[in-house]
Amino acid sequence: MEGMQVLGLALILYMITTHAHGQYYSQSVSYESLPEKTTNLHFFFHDTLSGKNPSAVLVARPNITTGQSVAPFGSVFVIDDPLTVGPELTSEVIGNAQGLYVLSSQDIPSLVVYFDFGFTSGEFNGSSISVFSRNPIINTERELAVVGGRGKFRLARGFAQLKTYFINASSGDAIVEYNVTVLHY
Ligand SMILES: *[C@@H]1O[C@H](CO)[C@@H](O)[C@H](O)[C@H]1NC(C)=O
Ligand SMILES: *[C@@H]1O[C@H](CO)[C@@H](O)[C@H](O)[C@H]1NC(C)=O
Ligand SMILES: *[C@@H]1O[C@H](CO)[C@@H](O)[C@H](O)[C@H]1NC(C)=O
Ligand SMILES: *[C@@H]1O[C@H](CO)[C@@H](O)[C@H](O)[C@H]1NC(C)=O
């Protein structure tokens, strides 16, 4: 009798696994085994276009001659910008923002940014958050959307509140204060 039960169980398992063949998805279950957490991050972002070692470089721009702007609508920049604890570039570096931004508005200076903020120290060393957002740089205070993350920020979502700390209108160099609220597991 016991032998029959074992055989029956084996048959059921066989049928389940056979049924799973050809399926590319698992059964959907809730992610509740891990509680969601909130982490606040505070740092300064240094976007340097001037000098011999700029951290932001213009890689493409439309070939229109109208207007005086060095970075007209349609320009694309690639960045590898240091992130520091304090507003000075000499203060402790805790990561970098890599990615690109595009001049995306036809009338006012405004960007769409595609950044990966990678952290290189402390609890979040090796983890990063992904930002994909409009960035109306004409406003001193603005907000960006956090759409994902890696490592300890896996499945992250949130928002970043920005305040321009310093801007050189002629060179375009800027230091921006970031307060980021991240929900993650
Ligand atoms: C812009 O590019 C187009 C197409 O290659 C070319 O015909 C035109 O002369 C260029 N204009 C300027 C100002 O370089
Ligand atoms: C960050 O992680 C890397 C790779 O694991 C390690 O080499 C480095 O020492 C760490 N840095 C800090 C400040 O913890
Ligand atoms: C970040 O938060 C601190 C403390 O709440 C506040 O003093 C600062 O003004 C905030 N900065 C931004 C850019 O939101
Ligand atoms: C602003 O940038 C210009 C051009 O690069 C430079 O000559 C000037 O010293 C800068 N001013 C400040 C306050 O950094």
Image (cartoon, grey):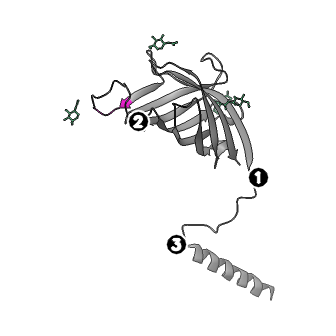
* Amino acid at circle 2: Asp
Q: From the Cβ of disc 1, is ligand 3 less than 8 Å away?
A: no
Residue 96 in view in this figure: yes
In the rendered image, residue 40 lying in the magenta stretch gets the answer no
Of label 3 and label 1, which has the lower sequence position? Answer: 3
Discs 1/2, front: 2
Residue 94: x and y in percent read 64, 27
Residue 67: x and y in percent read 32, 27
Left or right: 32, with 63 as reference point: right
Of label 1 and label 2, which has the lower sequence position? Answer: 1
10 Å neighbourhood of mark 2: few (<14), some, or many (≥20)? few
Q: Is residue 44 above or below residue 15?
A: above
Residue 18: x and y in percent read 58, 77
- Residue 22 shows which numbered tag? 3
Q: Nearer the viewer, residue 13 or 114?
A: 114
Main secondary-structure element of the magenta-colored stretch: loop
Residue 127 in view in this figure: no
User: Picture quarter containing residue 73?
Assistant: top left
Residue at image coords 56%, 41%:
131
Residue at image coords 31%, 34%:
62
The local secondary structure at tag 2 comes to loop
Give the extent of the magenta segment. Answer: 59-64
Q: Which residue is mark 1?
A: 35
Discs 3/1, front: 1
- Residue 107 shows which numbered tag? 2
| Residues at marks 1 and 2, CA–CA distance in whole angstroms | 44 Å
Ligand 1 visible in quadrant? top left
Residue 141: x and y in percent read 60, 32
| Residues at marks 3 and 1, CA–CA distance in whole angstroms | 33 Å
